[in-house]
Image (cartoon, rainbow, N blue to C red):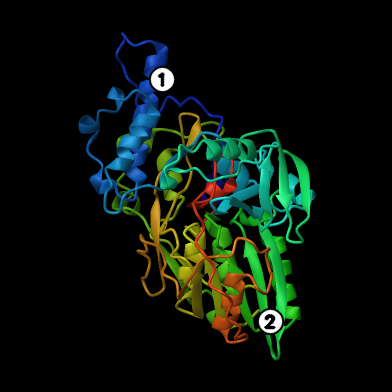
Amino acid sequence: MYRKTLIHLVILTSLMVGIFNAGCKKDNKSSLTAAQAAANLSKDTLYYLFKDEYMFTDVIPAYDVVNPHSFANNDSLFAKLTRYSTTPKDHYSFIDKTGYVSSVIGGGVSQGDIGLSVTYNALNDMRVTEVSKGSPSYAQSVHRGWQVTAVNGNTNMTYDGSSVGGNSTNITRISNAIYNSSSVSLTFLKPDNTSVTKTLNAASYTIDPVTFDSVYTFGARKVGYMVLSYFIDLTNIQTELNSVFSSFVSQGVTDLVVDLRYNGGGSVATSEYMADLIAPSSVGIDSTKVMYTAVFNSIVQNQTYSTFTKTCKLPPPYQTYFYSDLFDAENTGDVIDYVKKGSLNIQNVVFLVTDGTASASELLINNLKPYMNVKLIGKTTYGKPYAFFPIPVGGYDMYAISFKTANSLNQGDYYNGLSVNVDMYEDLTKDWGKLDEAYLNQAFMTLGVKSLQLAKSQKAISAPLYSSKSVRGFKGMIEYRKKK
């Protein structure tokens, strides 16, 4: 039974823990101060736990070669450990020092922002790309597609990034104002050519990732459409997902379009639940069809942990368990089966994606491919077939690549992303659900329910402006469970 509770509870409460228990190996050099000894113990803990659970453990050198105590701090040690993996290069692992993942993905609560994302559509054309439901921007009726014409009264919106030989002065000013300020005044030009200025104050709010949903009728065909911004923990979104899919069923939906263009991932359990909702009834409810397999390293599979991992106890209040218990609770070599949820029974699903579509989003797509007619529209996805589970180290949560996934056809090494069936740029000037929005229009064409080809959309001048405080910057696949 402890395996069903240990993972979930440790994840949600480990961020404030800053000391380790007596079961861990300590530096016995009497010349060290208490602070130095604690710092060395923290480095040892990071090294051994990283080495034992890291997906690419074979490339991590022995303790004496790495010499953890020689590093200035945990950050520099962690950076060194992640650089040993080159094929593929590890640009996924991270240490969460703000509690972002636990709060936003795990708890479904923002850390305090205005809930707005922006992107340059052209050198002098910045657009709102997404507004988080429940956020201050949402409360003031700001919409995707609105043009930002002034920030705090400054109308100089010109893109000045390195790609055009600029020094990024404007980008830095605008990014700080939108993402890193407690309050910002933004002037918008709306689609009807009227202008409005709104003062937006940062705040914490309950996250609602179902940004938009609707049903479109084309003769006998009915297409359900939903925008899912990220995969928060299932306990915080399951009721809403059930409601949306029940609505699809009651309206007779025959085909489905799922918009994941900015979805950087999140909870593995939520991705699985979405797959169970979307998959055809042929997958059954009796767990006979494989959804995917989770593959761990040989140390976790064979439970050949270091003495440190086997004798070092978890932080309070879970000090009766060892770190090896935490790793074992992930169930080595896990095979996850389909258990059909709801009564939606369709064969065609189109996913709208970009290079911001990552991890748990890619997992959902990959898992459905063996069982449905799956099409992708947009741009090649990010490429992250790996997942983490949180490991408390030094008062923070360490997310080092823990396992990789493969679907029922053993397909899963999409390090370079999932390729699209229709390669095209999105239209940043249109709101969600508009029939003339480029991606949605193409989805209807791909499904064969509409034949109107729109003018080709143009490439945005730059990548979206993100910051560490913006949920849009997150790309990950987090295992929160209580495994099956």
Looking at the rendered structure, the kind of residue marked 1 is Ala
Residue at the disc numbered 2 = 253
Circle 1 — which element?
A: helix
Looking at the rendered structure, the kind of residue marked 2 is Val
From this view, report whether residue 5 is shown above or below residue 230: above
Residue at horizontal 45%, vertical 78%? 370
Neighbour class for label 1 at 10 Å: few (<14), some, many (≥20)?
some
Inspect this view and state whether residue 24 appears: no
On the image, the x and y values in percent for residue 484 come to 52, 60
Numbered tag placed on residue 213 in the rendering: none
From this view, report whether residue 243 is shown above or below residue 301: below
Please name whichever residue, 160 or 297, is drawn nearer the observer in this view of the structure.
Answer: 160
**Circle nearer the N terminus (1, 2):** 1
Residue at the disc numbered 1 = 38
Please name whichever residue, 211 or 274, is drawn nearer the observer in this view of the structure.
Answer: 211
Residue at horizontal 45%, vertical 69%? 366
On the image, the x and y values in percent for residue 242 come to 70, 67
Please name whichever residue, 398 or 322, is drawn nearer the observer in this view of the structure.
Answer: 398
In the visual, does 31 lie left or right of 312? left
In the visual, does 145 lie left or right of 469? right
Which of discs 1 and 2 lies nearer the camera? The answer is 2
The Cα atoms of the two marked residues, 1 and 2, are separated by 59 Å
